[in-house]
Image (cartoon, grey):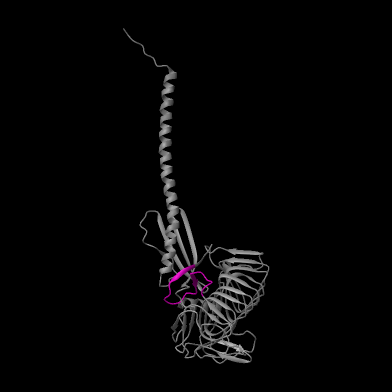
């Protein structure tokens, strides 16, 4: 007897449907697992990119030899992961870049780098050994660690005023040396390059100051600039980022301009009253900062004079060969005067007027007239006071140097053999 077994087409279709459904479910599970693992690796890679960028910046902080070439950091032994670091000069400071990559994802971290200053351990005052004692007069106050000549400190008398403090130095006294701590050679080389050589060679690197009211260039992009042999007036503009503006004559900044992180280079730089911003000004003849200005951290005013061949040359033009900071202005950052001549004179190279403030570092291998307040540290060859028609050498009259209203750790101009720190993260 024969049995005829027939499977209905509906049952066959159902079986195929179930098989396909199971196959899709399995494929979905496999795809989900693969996607989960891939996304987990991508997320982990992105996090590691950030962590490795921090390691890259830390490597630059510990790097003693200055090398502007992009370097591959070889401590990462992971497939598809890489890190590159680059160190270059940016005005008085250094610019560190760390670029990390995992597969196609990149992360870039950029920082301004300078010397590390610990407020309670670093010098509040370093007065070069010139075999002349420091003399304090009036309401002068020095608080912190003071490095002084072997003759120490005395109280003095100017224009009917004696010294009114209860202590000559409110802190410890140590012996200074015949040389100021020196800026790193790369700083000096960069300053001379900006003043003597910097020009814009490629049209693609040029910015037009008349192109609009807002000009921005990221530090992740190539440096751009503006160059002129004529005076430059900057007003009614916001200029920010990786930009250098140079004039062979003079630059004047009006209070209607807002400058952030850029570098200005000219023989003469004049900053109008009530100007605000954050920038570096590098000059070879003079810098004047008007009244009620506010330059935020880390700004820098630097006057560099290559006067070794003309040590006796004197100018009768007001504020020439000088950084002048007018009353009620504040500079948060660095104020620096550097000259190449070694013969001392009786001229004033930095003047900080009454009620004016510097929060950060003053470095002057000339004469500093202190009438206002420096919160941070001062390195200088001599102090000078112009009072009652007389010049008083190594005198401070109604000036203040203190380390109590600054952060415990902050950054300044790179000095030889000093540890480094990040002053500011860039964009």
What x and y, as percent, mark residue 226? 60, 71
- Kindly identify the residue that appears in the image at 43 percent across and 43 percent down: 36
* On screen, residue 89 above or below 343: above
| Main secondary structure of the magenta stretch | loop
What x and y, as percent, mark residue 220? 52, 62
* Magenta stretch contains residue 353: no
For the N terminus, give its image quadrant. top left
- Kindly identify the residue that appears in the image at 66 percent across and 64 percent down: 213
Residue nearest the observer in this picture, 72 or 367: 367
* On screen, residue 312 above or below 182: below
What x and y, as percent, mark residue 382? 52, 86
What x and y, as percent, mark residue 287? 61, 79
* Magenta stretch contains residue 410: yes
Residue nearest the observer in this picture, 384 or 273: 384
For the C terminus, give its image quadrant. bottom right
Image quadrant assignment for residue 296: bottom right
Judged from this view, the residue extending furthest toward the left is: 1
Judged from this view, the residue extending furthest toward the front is: 166
Residue stretch rendered in magenta on the structure: 403-422
In this picture, residue 255 sits left or right of residue 32: right
Residue nearest the observer in this picture, 130 or 345: 130
- Kindly identify the residue that appears in the image at 48 percent across and 61 percent down: 109
């Amino acid at each position: 007897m024969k049995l005829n077994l027939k499977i209905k087409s509906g049952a066959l279709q159902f079986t195929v449907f179930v098989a396909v459904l199971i196959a899709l479910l399995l494929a979905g599970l496999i795809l989900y697992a693969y996607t989960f693992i891939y996304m987990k690796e991508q997320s982990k890679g992105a996090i590691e990119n950030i962590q490795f960028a921090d390691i890259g910046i830390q490597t630059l902080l510990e790097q003693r030899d200055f090398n502007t070439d992009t370097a591959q950091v070889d401590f990462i032994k992971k497939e598809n992961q890489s890190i590159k670091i680059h160190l270059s000069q940016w005005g008085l400071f250094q610019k560190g870049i760390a670029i990390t990559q995992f597969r196609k994802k990149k992360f870039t971290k950029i920082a301004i780098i300078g010397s590390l200053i610990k407020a309670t351990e670093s010098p509040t005052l370093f007065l070069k050994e010139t075999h002349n004692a420091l003399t304090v007069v009036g309401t002068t106050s020095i608080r912190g660690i003071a490095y002084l000549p072997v003759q120490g400190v005395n109280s003095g008398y100017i224009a009917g005023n004696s010294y009114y403090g209860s202590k000559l130095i409110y802190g410890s006294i140590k012996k200074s040396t015949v040389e100021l701590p020196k800026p790193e050679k790369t700083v000096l080389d960069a300053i001379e390059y900006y003043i003597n050589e910097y020009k814009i060679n490629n049209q693609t690197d040029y910015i037009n100051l008349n192109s609009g009211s807002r000009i921005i260039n990221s530090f992740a992009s190539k440096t751009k600039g503006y160059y002129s042999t004529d005076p430059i007036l900057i007003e009614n503009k916001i200029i920010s980022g990786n930009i250098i503006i140079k004039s062979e004559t003079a630059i004047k900044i009006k209070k209607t301009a807002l400058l952030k992180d850029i570098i200005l280079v000219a023989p003469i730089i004049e900053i109008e009253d009530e100007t605000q911003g954050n920038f570096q000004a590098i000059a070879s003849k003079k810098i004047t900062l008007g009244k009620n200005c506010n330059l935020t951290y880390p700004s820098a005013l630097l006057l560099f004079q290559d006067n070794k061949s003309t040590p006796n040359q004197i100018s009768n033009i007001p504020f020439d060969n000088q950084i002048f900071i007018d009353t009620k202005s504040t500079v948060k950052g660095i104020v620096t005067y550097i000259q190449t001549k070694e013969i001392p004179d009786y001229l004033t190279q930095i003047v900080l007027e009454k009620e004016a403030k510097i929060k950060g570092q003053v470095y002057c291998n000339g004469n500093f007239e202190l009438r206002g307040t420096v919160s941070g540290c001062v390195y200088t060859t001599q102090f000078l006071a112009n009072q009652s028609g007389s010049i008083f050498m190594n005198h401070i009259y109604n000036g203040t140097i203190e380390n109590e209203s600054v952060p415990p750790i902050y950054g300044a101009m790179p000095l030889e053999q000093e540890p480094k720190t990040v002053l500011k993260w860039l964009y």
